[in-house]
Image: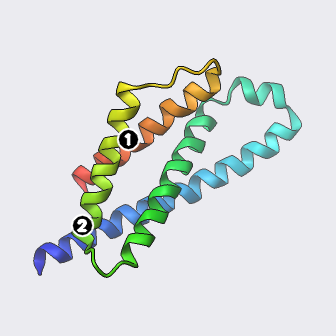
Amino acid sequence: MKDQTTATDKLNRIFDGVRGDIAEGQEHLEEWCEKFKMSPGYEMEWANGTVEIAARVEVYARVEASIIRLRENDEIDDAGILAHLEASAKREVLNGSCCPPQSTSPMSNLTNQYRVKAWATLYEKLSWA
C-alpha cells in the first residue's frame, strides 16, 4: 500500500505542476497577445520565449488530459499512469531528437524543438518527483 500512496503522491505533484505551468503559460500568452496587437513586428522579433511557453502549454495540456482520462479508467492505478507518462515522454524526446523536423518554416522548427524540450522537462520531473 505504501508504494501506491507514493505513486499517488507523485502523480498528484506532477498533475498539480502541469496544471500550474499551463495556467502560468496561458496568462503569459494572453498578455503577449495584447502586446502583439499594439506592435506585431516588434513582438515577433522577440517571441522566442513566447514560442517556448506556447509549446510547453500545448504539451502539458496533452499530459493533463491524459492523466484525467487514465484516472477515469479503473483498470490502471497511479503507478501505471506514471509508467505510461514516463514511457510517453521518453518516446517523444527520442523521436524528436532522432528525427528533428526539417520544415522550411523556421518558426515550425523552433516550436517543435520547444515541444521536445517540454517533454524532456516532464521526463526529468517524472524521474525525480
Q: Is residue 73 left or right of residue 68?
A: left
In the rendering, at what x and y percent does residue 114 appear? 50, 34
**Helix, strand or loop status at disc 2:** helix
65 or 13: nearer the viewer:
65
Residue 98 sits in which quadrant?
top left
Q: In the image, what residue occupies the spot 36% across and 78% down?
A: 73
Q: Nearer the viewer, residue 24 or 62?
A: 62
Which quadrant of the figure contains the N terminus? Answer: bottom left
Quick one: label 1 or label 2, which is nearer the N terminus?
2
Q: Where is residue 25 in the image (x, y as percent from the top left)?
A: 59, 51
Q: How far apart are marks 1 and 2 (CA)?
A: 18 Å
Point out residue 19 in the picture as x, y percentages from the top left corner: 49, 63
Q: Which quadrant would residue 121 be assigned to in this image?
A: top left
Q: Name the residue under label 2.
A: 80
Asked whether residue 60 appears in the rendered view, the answer is: yes
Q: Name the residue under label 1.
A: 92
